[in-house]
Image (cartoon, grey):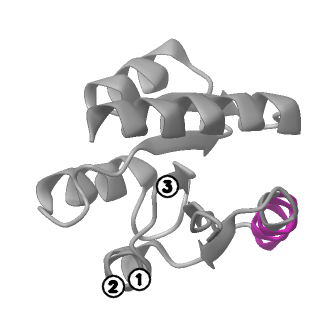
Amino acid sequence: MDKPPKKRIFVVDDQEEVLSLLKDYLTGAGFEVVVCKEPKDVLTSINSFKPDLILLDLLMPELGGFEVCEILNNDPQTQGIPIIIISGLGDSVDIKKACKLGVVGYLVKPFSLAALSKEISKALANKEKVF
């Protein structure tokens, strides 16, 4: 019997230590992971990787997470991919803005890996129901 393919997670954050932590944790949890430190490279990388889920920081140089969300939502190839925000911004205004952009989860840094796992499981389960 063939094993089902690994779920793919794309991580966007400008902090090297966050990218390293998430990549190690998610790879260990059985996911295929690609990380991106440069928000301007997101679209190209996502279209070639075709992830099942995106973890996205909001505070990044040049192109912020809200702008990245809008770009992804307006691209037919990426608009169906669930997005979970992982950010230092925990203000209700930011959370509401993210929800209006269609994000499926929101974690405030510092976050627990247990909370991250729960959000990922929920997002992937909901994605399965949609398709």
Q: Disc 3, disc 2: CB below 8 Å? A: no
- Residue type marked 2: Thr
Residue at mark 2? 44
Mark 2 or 1, which is nearer the eye? 2
Q: Earlier in the sequence, mark 3 or mark 2?
A: 2
Q: Is residue 85 visible?
A: yes
At numbered mark 3, what does the secondary structure look like: helix, strand or loop? strand
Viewer-proximal residue, 18 or 34? Answer: 34
Residue at mark 3? 54
Magenta span covers which residues? Answer: 16-25
Residue at mark 1? 41
Viewer-proximal residue, 100 or 88? Answer: 100
| Horizontal side of residue 113 vs 116, given as left or right | right
- Residue type marked 1: Asp
Q: Main secondary structure of the magenta part?
A: helix
x, y percentage for residue 36? Answer: 57, 76
x, y percentage for residue 44? Answer: 33, 84
- Residue type marked 3: Ile
Q: CA distance from mark 2 to mark 1?
A: 6 Å
At numbered mark 2, what does the secondary structure look like: helix, strand or loop? helix
Q: Disc 1, disc 3: CB below 8 Å? A: no
Q: Quadrant of the C terminus?
A: top left
